[in-house]
């Protein structure tokens, strides 16, 4: 019982006792409508998998007790009132402090969720930053939307690739760089709020912007078009505009199961995304 070989995914401790962490805090269950389960997509391999368990029943044994009962618990408690209001579609405005906490919560949840889906695009150093920061590093993108319907579902997407870039130095022979780019996005629908978080990291010398490749490959342009306030430094408060776009879930690539629920038809792939070519 005393020797834990597994390292905590947030603090890296191999000596702390590992405890059971709920991916989604049980306390949230009382605000959210019954859930549709979880989906995992690996863009690198094309793998697509559905997790049969309910969203709220998913647990993970990769977080140490001090993390679980310390900063993570504090963060959960801190965001619960505002998260509950958002989930239930109540008029809500966020202070900058609340927005930052919610963004951290989204990133934390993304990482924990990533581990249940066996996506490890957020490396330990980046996971540790969530624990220590007040404002998320720029590798993270967190956005939220109001959603007209009330449902509960989630989708995690993983992407990683080797990148080669060639740099020309004033006409001298080119330098070839090699590195790996990672991205992991989590689209979470809880009641009437959609929480989108994405982590992207690429080699420092990488010339192209990963966002662009991501956009092209995965229709991120569609998402950007309906982006409402970005959570983080720029959100000063204001209300979160209510978005009554019945088809938002299509734009946000929300789960096939949500599609089935709302239309009674089977999801048959990407033809629903408006192409932006
Ligand atoms: Zn820990």
Image (spheres, rainbow, N blue to C red):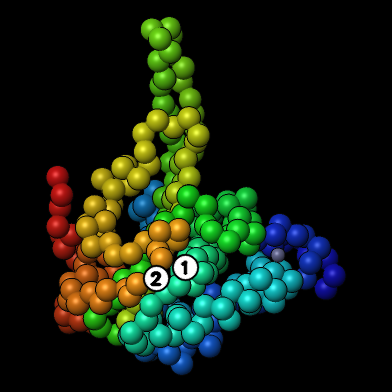
Residue depicted at x 85% and y 70%: 2
- Does residue 258 appear in the picture of this structure? no
Q: Residues within 10 Å of mark 1 (few under 14, many from 20)?
A: some
* Above or below, comparing residue 246 to residue 5 in the picture: below
Q: Residues within 10 Å of mark 2 (few under 14, many from 20)?
A: some
* The C terminus sits in image quarter: top left
Residue depicted at x 51% and y 69%: 97
The quadrant of the picture showing ligand 1 is bottom right
* Above or below, comparing residue 93 to residue 142 in the picture: below
Residue depicted at x 32% and y 42%: 213
Disc assigned to residue 96 = 1
Residue depicted at x 69% and y 77%: 69
* Above or below, comparing residue 44 to residue 274 in the picture: above
* The N terminus sits in image quarter: bottom right
Residue 58: x %, y % from top left: 53, 78
The quarter of the picture where residue 10 lies is: bottom right
Mark with earlier residue (1, 2): 1
Question: Which element type, helix, strand or loop, lies under badge 2?
Answer: loop
Residue sticking out furthest to the right: 2
Question: Which element type, helix, strand or loop, lies under badge 1?
Answer: helix
Distance of mark 1 from mark 2, alpha carbons? 6 Å
Question: How many numbered marks does the figure carry?
Answer: 2
The quarter of the picture where residue 31 lies is: bottom left
The quarter of the picture where residue 157 lies is: bottom left
Residue 124: x %, y % from top left: 62, 53
Are the residues at dot 1 and dot 2 in contact (C-beta closer than 8 Å)? yes
Q: Which residue is mark 2?
A: 237
């Amino acid at each position: 019982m005393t020797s834990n070989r597994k390292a905590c995914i947030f603090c890296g401790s191999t000596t702390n006792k590992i405890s059971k962490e709920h991916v989604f805090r049980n306390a949230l269950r009382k605000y959210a409508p019954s859930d549709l389960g979880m989906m995992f997509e690996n863009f690198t391999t094309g793998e697509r998998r559905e997790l049969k368990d309910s969203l709220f029943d998913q647990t993970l044994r990769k977080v140490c007790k001090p993390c679980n009962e310390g900063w993570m618990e504090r963060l959960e408690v801190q965001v619960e009132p505002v998260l509950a209001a958002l989930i239930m579609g109540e008029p809500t405005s966020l202070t900058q402090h609340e927005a930052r906490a919610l963004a951290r919560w989204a990133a934390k949840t993304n990482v924990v969720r990533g581990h249940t889906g066996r996506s490890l695009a957020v490396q330990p150093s980046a996971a540790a930053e969530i624990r220590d920061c007040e404002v998320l590093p720029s590798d993270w993108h967190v956005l939220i939307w109001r959603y007209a319907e009330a449902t509960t579902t989630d989708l995690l997407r993983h992407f990683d690739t080797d990148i080669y870039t060639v740099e020309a130095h004033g006409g001298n022979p080119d330098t070839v760089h090699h590195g790996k780019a990672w991205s992991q996005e989590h689209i979470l629908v809880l009641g009437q709020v959609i929480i989108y978080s994405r982590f992207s990291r690429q080699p420092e010398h990488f010339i192209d912007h990963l966002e662009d490749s991501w956009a092209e490959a995965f229709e991120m342009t569609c998402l950007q078009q309906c982006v409402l306030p970005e959570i983080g430094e720029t959100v000063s408060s204001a209300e979160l505009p209510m978005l009554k776009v019945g088809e938002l879930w299509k734009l946000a690539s929300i789960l096939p199961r949500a599609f089935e629920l709302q239309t009674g038809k089977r999801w048959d792939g990407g033809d629903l995304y408006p192409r932006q070519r």
